[in-house]
Image (cartoon, rainbow, N blue to C red):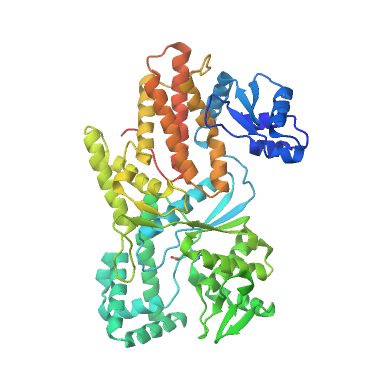
Amino acid sequence: MDFRRHIASNIRADGAAADELYALLAVPPNTEMGDFALPCFKLAKVMRKAPALIAEEIAASYPKDEIVTEVTAVNGYVNFKINRAYWAKLTLERILQEREKYGSSDEGAGKTVCIDYSSVNIAKPFHIGHLSTTVLGSALYKLHAFLGYKPVGINHLGDYGTQFGKLISAYLRWGDRETIEKGGLRALNALYVRFHEEAEKDESLNDEARGFFKKIESGDAESVALFNWFKELTLKDVGKIYDLLDVHFDSWAGESFYNDKMQPVIDELREKNLLVESEGARIVDLEAYGMPPCIILRSDGASLYATRDIAAAIYRKKTYDFYKCLYVVAYQQNLHFKQFFKVLELMGKEWAKDLVHVAYGMVSLEDGSMSTRKGKVVYLEDVIAKCVEKALAIITEKNPALADKESIARTVGVGAVIFGALYNNKIKDITFSYDKVLNFEGETSCYVQYTCARANSVLEKGGRAKSFAAESICPQEFEVVKKLAEFPDVLHDALEKYEPCFVARYAVDLAQVFNKFYFDCSILNAEGSQRDFRLALTECVLITLKNALGLLGIGVPDKM
Ligand code: ARG
């Protein structure tokens, strides 16, 4: 089934290992050229021959068989053509057998990967800026699990800092239990915003807030109880969104979890002569690496965000013995990650090389940015609700008689939000547009979902095929087969580059080639083995699209 592997192992090229050839083999953009192509430019160095000559020699010496039927050399490339009927049969057989497991593998067996994502801040709004980390992290989680790794999803809660003193001060002054209980995160944020407004007029509020923060730290029962209540309310509210987005965590160990785990880190830094005093603070000097110092302790003795991250990384290594530890965090924090990764390296942690900052770009709505302090935030909850509402309107217009419209609209609307955030390379800044993510003809999840509904309806009318041997294959069918067969490779690449967008784009590509096939070739009016083959092909597309969207956390309605 793995034709690339098959070809790579049969190529005769002195000095080039099968693995290297395998990596070089690519799918040419144009089927006319071949089904696989080997560019010989990189081989020229090892083999000390001109690429064109290498290509000719490889083409001449390749042992053709029932799988590879044609091998030609063109301008430094070797083009391979596969027996299409054979390819189709193997591909369909595999998909129909593996079904919801199609695309999975055990390449990650025995490897634990920690994924730090979403990492919300207590009592702060869960806004559109958290969308990417949440859905990227969740997709990476599912992808790792699908490829045999053991993922550990970590929500590194922002549950430590002076802001909780402010919140307590604000609550005791202007809050009441009922309003907060009802209003949840939004009511908490309103208190926070009010505190900042009032503190501008009255400086002493800041001292009061510091006092409350000290009380939390020293374990004062009332302050701690309030803080825990804020935490509970936050988690309840974000929990609803996680449920909608199908996002899960294995650990909620946040910043405060490391309160008692930092002293050993500070001791170790001191022992290793890494800690320097600077204006009363304790820092690790990183000038030699072209970075500002990493501050470990402030002059008042308080620890910092980086201190907690260093302690957290050490804790994670000890607890999970991770193969990799990913941090899905916006590129604004690039320096922070570079700094504390370096500190761990300087501490002699050889595993510091396994820490990966999976950085992504900003998401903004068409109407501009937001700030937590001034209270101008776009809540993720509202974005999702609006997408669901718009989805319902579209579906109702397209298909008024459809049953269960509300639940379908939810799947479509939530999918649009997720897909909108995942469709581009993660590092790109994106402007979120409702019309764009809900365009049924665009490169969107609803386009893919609609295609699934179409495939479903074909299968309902035509029934599932019993046999799927293809005697001859038309180009439209073959494009679908080829796309289907790519899926496992796409997943492998998506994981390797931490780019769930590969999966999203793949889903759109597969939907497009299927739709071309659907409009050009008749499925239900075909006869005999051709009809069977086309039905089987349709079923395989449905299975694969469902698997692809599922990895992104997006469901597929039967009808739309
Ligand atoms: N809560 C942080 C923020 O909102 C993100 C935490 C990311 N994870 C980490 N280990 N630093 O900026």
Q: Is residue 511 left or right of residue 153?
A: left
- Height in image: 212 above or below 105? below
Residue at point 52%, 82% (across, down): 298
Q: Quadrant of the N terminus?
A: top right
- Height in image: 83 above or below 132? above
> Residue 380, how many percent across, how many down?
34, 57
Q: What is the total number of numbered labels drawn onto the structure image?
A: 0
Instruction: Compare residues 41 and 501 and report the one nearer the observer.
Output: 41
> Residue 61, how many percent across, how many down?
74, 24
Q: Quadrant of residue 381?
A: bottom left
Can see residue 480?
A: yes
- Height in image: 400 above or below 288? above
Residue at point 30%, 80% (across, down): 172
Q: Quadrant of residue 105?
A: top right
Instruction: Compare residues 56 and 228 and report the one nearer the observer.
Output: 56
Can see residue 19?
A: no
Instruction: Compare residues 108 and 43 and report the one nearer the observer.
Output: 43
Q: Quadrant of residue 44?
A: top right
Q: Quadrant of the C terminus?
A: top left
Q: Is residue 272 left or right of residue 282?
A: right
Residue at point 21%, 34% (across, down): 400
- Height in image: 107 above or below 70? below
Residue at point 38%, 17% (across, down): 524
Instruction: Compare residues 507 and 389 and report the one nearer the observer.
Output: 507
> Residue 308, how many percent across, how many down?
54, 71
- Residue at the top extreme of this rendering: 528
